[in-house]
Amino acid sequence: QKQLDTVAAQLNRRPRKRYGYATPDEMIKTLLVQ
């Protein structure tokens, strides 16, 4: 489980083109603030 958590964290910190090169974590924070 620890390895899966590490991989998930790495993927969530990777910028995505579909989000304007923001990370999924940044997008979630933006959506929660609205």
Image (spheres, rainbow, N blue to C red):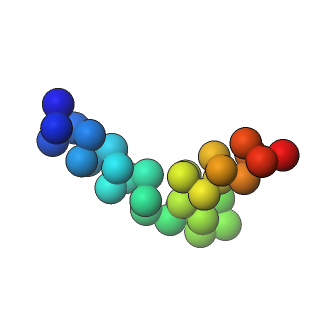
Task: Identify the residue at image location x=54%, y=60%.
Answer: 23
On the image, which quarter does residue 3 sit in? top left
**Rendering coords of residue 25 (x, y %):** 54, 52
Q: Outermost residue, front direction?
A: 33
Q: Is residue 18 visible?
A: no
Compared with residue 12, is residue 21 higher up or lower down, i.e. above or below?
A: below
Q: Is residue 34 visible?
A: yes
Compared with residue 9, is residue 16 higher up or lower down, i.e. above or below?
A: below
**Rendering coords of residue 20 (x, y %):** 67, 66
Compared with residue 29, is residue 19 higher up or lower down, i.e. above or below?
A: below
Task: Identify the residue at image location x=84%, y=46%.
Answer: 34
Q: Quadrant of the N terminus?
A: top left
Task: Identify the residue at image location x=77%, y=48%.
Answer: 33
Closest to the observer, 30 or 18: 30
Q: Outermost residue, right direction?
A: 34
Compared with residue 3, is residue 26 higher up or lower down, i.e. above or below?
A: below
Task: Identify the residue at image location x=59%, y=68%.
Answer: 21
Q: Outermost residue, bottom direction?
A: 21
